[in-house]
Image: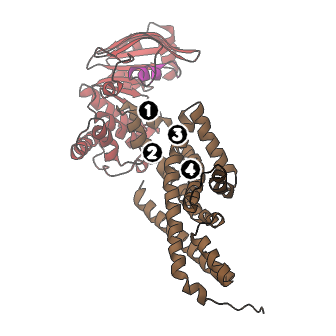
Amino acid sequence: MISIRDLHKYFGALHVLKGIDLDVQKGEVLSVIGASGSGKSTLLYCINGLEMIQDGAVTVDGTDVHAKGTDINKLRQKLGMVFQQWNSFPHLTALENVALAPRIVKCKSKAEAREIAAKQLQHVGLGEKLNVYPSALSGGQQQRLAIARALAMEPEYMLFDEATSALDPELVGEVLDTMRLLADEGMTMICVTHEMGFARDVSDRVAFFHQGVMEEIGPPAQIFGDARSEHTRKFLANVR
Amino acid sequence: MFDYNFHWRPVMKSLPDLLEAASLTLQVAVLAMVLGIVIGLCLALARLHLRGPVYWFATAWVELARNTPALFQLFFFGFGLGAFGLHLSPYLIVLAGLSFNCAGYLAENFRGGFKAVPETQIRASRSLGMTPWQAYSRVVIPQVFRIVYHPITNQMVWAVLMSSLGMLVGFRELSGETQFFASRTFRIFEYFAVTAVIYYVIVKVILLSSRLMAARLFRY
């Protein structure tokens, strides 16, 4: 379980997250929606310790992410992350991209790491592209490669930071399909997204962020059909 | 047209000596580059990530190496240190001078290379559980290496040519050896013409092998 208590995050004087309380259960799919700059992405970065926090606590399966003694590299193996700009490693083939972390972080043998990588690439539909460099892949394929790379560490949670925002419209579908596939397989997912269709159809719960505050959280039917907050209704009216 | 008579025989007779001196040239240039790359990498990282005395030391090194004549740098390791009673052999003077100079130039190449790799590559690596060292050594530095590969080749060529300054501190590398023979036989033009051809061939071989290596190394 990921549990967030009274989380405060500042960038200099800017108060980005203003006291977030949130629990995400195993197997749950949570979508986080809200305008740009509302703190959604920062929340993800705080969960896997890529950003420091100023107050509050984030715990993953009982381990405090930001505590001094925490082995953050070990903890991150549980927390797969997919970025908006996909960030594939340009100097490695698809197979090497995926095999690298299992090989050097989990110390698997070369053959074993490649086997894991091939399996995960197959999983996201890139079985034909094992020996291709990222420069020869489309944006959608690179994003699926990034998903396979995260999955190869056998994470228990997946964090998606606007995984489809940087993609050409016709490539969004293939990435969303891959994310649906993971959700169907029971992966615990936190998806920061602007894809309202995905949030409505796939999520167990939807959280709406507004100016660093989690204004509202609930089942998709409630958020999309009967939002309590004025801000939520306004936001949804604008994006639809 | 002009009444200069070419005499190539003396040059041809000392060709084996010249070629041996050429191998010394190549040796000192390669060694200076190896040292230059290692030191340049450290200087670049110091300038990117450190503050205080180490930062200022690295910055001063880069500034001096890039903004003063290479010959003066050689003189510093020769006559400069000599004035303080530290007498290096001509070989060491040239090696130290070239390494100092190459490190300064390469440091700036490396610094540019590090800046050209997006910060998000490190984030992505760390998110997979890599340590900072793993992220740097397996993800960032291989990409930096490609970015600085051709500038490094240029620097290698420059190191070979710059080593000719060695003749001014009494080092008998290719130019020093040529000077030695030329002044004994007065066939100055012939000697330096042949030596120029040798330099040309060395540089061409470096450029060609660099290109072949790049084709093997960088398939992306």
Q: Colour of chain B?
A: brown
Q: Which residue is mark 2?
A: B141
Residue density around tag 4, few if under 14, some if 14–19, many if 20 or more, within 10 Å:
many
Q: Colour of chain A?
A: red
Camera-near label (4 vs 1) is: 4
Using the rendered image, report if marks 3 and 4 lie on a common chain: yes
Please state which amino acid type lies under the numbered disc 1: Arg
**Residue pictured at 28% horizontal, 33% vertical:** A153
**Residue pictured at 30% horizontal, 39% vertical:** A104
Q: Which residue is mark 1?
A: B123
* Subunit that carries the residue with mark 1: B
- Colouring scheme, one of rainbow, by chain, secondary structure, one colour: by chain
N-terminal of the pair, mark 3 or mark 4, is 3
Q: Which residue is mark 4?
A: B103
Q: Is residue B74 left or right of residue A233?
A: right
Camera-near label (3 vs 4) is: 4
> Does residue A88 appear anywhere in the picture?
no
Under circle 3, the secondary element is helix
Q: Quadrant of residue A68?
A: top left
